[in-house]
Image (cartoon, rainbow, N blue to C red):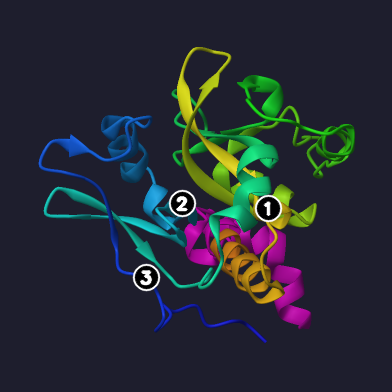
Amino acid sequence: MRLKISPAVAANDPVLLSGAGRPLLPMVSRELLKNFFAHGLGDLLILHVSASNVLLGNILFEKDKMILKDHGFAQGVTPEQVAPCLESGAIGALCSLDDRDWESLSVLGIDHCHIEGDLSATRTNLLAHSRNQYGDTLMGFEGSVYRAYKLMLDSNLIPVVVLDMVEVKNGISGLSVCDLRLASVPLSTIHIAYEYQTQFVEKNLTVTVEDCEVDPEEFNELFGTYLKTA
């Protein structure tokens, strides 16, 4: 059964991140957020602490104001409960890389980043041994956000973007990607976040026939026998 994702009735009011030339996130460049937004940041689940509220939602632009629209997934969760995720849950950096085969945002593993915080030996071992069919590990990952999130989900991690700047070793800046499973939150929050991210990955990694440019003769050569016997 697929989960129907919709804004919760109990969601918090939208939180203004910047507007009227006044950024409310002093550690994050507005230009970086606008650049990331143009490449799909608005589709990614954001974890943010505002005053005493914990928000899980998406960034929107409305009349040149940048807001975070909360979905209510973390209703009742306190900043103290998500502190382990923010302090020790880093699993990579979201960034924009030029001259790549993909057009989406990219994710770099922690081997490519200057990560602050404590990564235990157990966590480091997990990231080093989580591997996909292409041989990529989470520690040294470099690829599209879709492939990165699939590898993370397949490794029982739940990636969320945190609005904290991360310096990448090639000199560019990105946003921290953390594992929500480290937060002490209700299982319902974990479940709905997992379903949200899974649907996001499936939507962007599923290729339909219409998406493929295949020559009709080549298609018939590949599938003609099957179609005649099916």
Q: Secondary structure at mark 2?
A: strand
Disc 1 marks which amino acid? Lys
Nearer the observer, 162 or 204: 162
* Mark 1 nearby-residue class (10 Å; few <14, some 14–19, many ≥20): many
Q: Quadrant of residue 198?
A: bottom right
Say left or right for 100 vs 228. left
Asked whether residue 110 is drawn in magenta, I would say no
Residue that appears at 61% across and 73% down: 192
- Labelled disc at residue 150: 1
Nearer the observer, 180 or 141: 180
Residue that appears at 54% across and 55% down: 79
Indicate which label's residue lies in the foreground, 1 or 3.
Answer: 3
**Does 2 appear above or below 55?**
below
**Does 162 appear above or below 1?**
above
Nearer the observer, 227 or 114: 114
**Quadrant location, the C terminus:** bottom right
- Labelled disc at residue 48: 2
Indicate which label's residue lies in the foreground, 1 or 2.
Answer: 2
Q: Percent x, y for residue 16? A: 25, 53
Q: Are marks 1 and 3 in contact (CB under 8 Å)?
A: no
Q: Tag 2 or tag 1, which sits nearer the N-term? A: 2
Nearer the observer, 52 or 138: 52
Q: Secondary structure at mark 3?
A: loop
Give the extent of the magenta segment: 203-230
Q: Which residue is mark 3?
A: 12
